[in-house]
Image (spheres, rainbow, N blue to C red):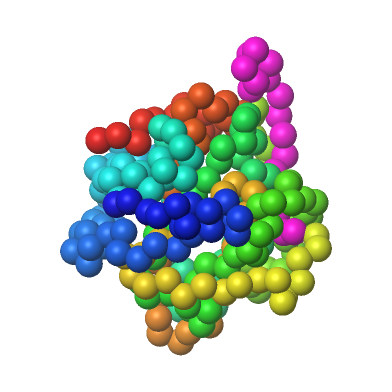
Amino acid sequence: MLISRDQIKQYHNEGFLMVENLLTDQEVSDFLNHESKPKPEDWQKGLRTHTTDPQWQYLATHPNITGITSQLLNGDPQIVQSMYLNKQPDGGTGIAIHQDTHYIKNEPNTLMACWVAMDDTDPENGGLCVVPGSNLKGLQSAHKNLNNSEHTSWETDYEMQDKNGKKWTERLHSFEMDDVGPDEILKLTVPRGGGVFFTGLTIHGSYANQSPDRIRRAFAIHYVKNGTWVFRTDIQELTSSLR
């Protein structure tokens, strides 16, 4: 799947790009059916399930997704992590408005993501939100999320390692940006099988699912350009995006 120069320009200027029909309806159904089946106790490998599960690997290396990613990065994308985001109706919480670079320190900063809708998503059922142009302002200040009614809250220590082998521990938590007003936040409507590409500096997140009966499922993959160093040791071992 090729994108235009105007789409690439939009991505760099606004920090995100929405593209429909990344996956066919059958590909979405195959993944959701796979997720609904019982799994062995040790099946999920945290943020690296794409390295062991064929369906997760299929999405993380999907040529439509990685093809656009390579155009946006202007280089070979390496997979950092993958996540299945299953938000239940009637109050399922989201992820507070944040920048991914707070969670995934990398050098040089080439971090980007693709968020793929596995259901029709919109503001009512807790769809993705972005702050257009926030990627142009660099890494901004944030605090620990305290709004548990809308967003998941957590705090965890992670081991870090630089290129020279120096190791240290860094405490991360559920970040929420300090100075983002409601009028800056754009709540997206993304159809099933469509996706949103955004940079590691693009402020984004989601709110609780207020729909009484509509589930909101999504699959997210984070990539960096080949040659980038990722500091967190739990996701430091990158994998190729090529099938």
**Nearest the camera: 62 or 31?**
62
Q: Is residue 23 left or right of residue 226?
A: left
Predominant SS of the magenta segment: strand
Q: Is residue 186 above or below residue 154?
A: below
Q: Is residue 230 above or below residue 53?
A: above
Q: Position of residue 198 (x, y in %)?
A: 53, 53
**Nearest the camera: 50 or 13?**
13
- Residue 140 belongs to the span the image colors magenta: no
Q: Residue at x 52, y 67 (%)?
A: 128
Q: Residue at x 71, y 29 (%)?
A: 169
Q: Residue at x 18, y 64 (%)?
A: 26
Q: Is residue 54 left or right of residue 198?
A: left
**Nearest the camera: 121 or 63?**
63
Q: Identify the image quadrant of residue 61.
A: top left
Q: Position of residue 52 (x, y in %)?
A: 31, 36
- Residue 174 belongs to the span the image colors magenta: yes
Q: Position of residue 112 (x, y in %)?
A: 52, 45
Q: Is residue 216 above or below residue 139?
A: below
Q: Position of residue 119 (x, y in %)?
A: 35, 71
Residue lying furthest top in this view? 164
**Nearest the camera: 189 or 28?**
189
Q: Residue at x 57, y 51 (%)?
A: 12
Residue 188 visible in rendering: yes
Image quadrant for the C terminus?
Answer: top left
Residue lying furthest front in this view? 5
Residue 198 visible in rendering: no
Q: Identify the image quadrant of residue 40.
A: top left
Q: Identify the image quadrant of residue 75.
A: top left
Part of the protein shown in magenta: 161-177
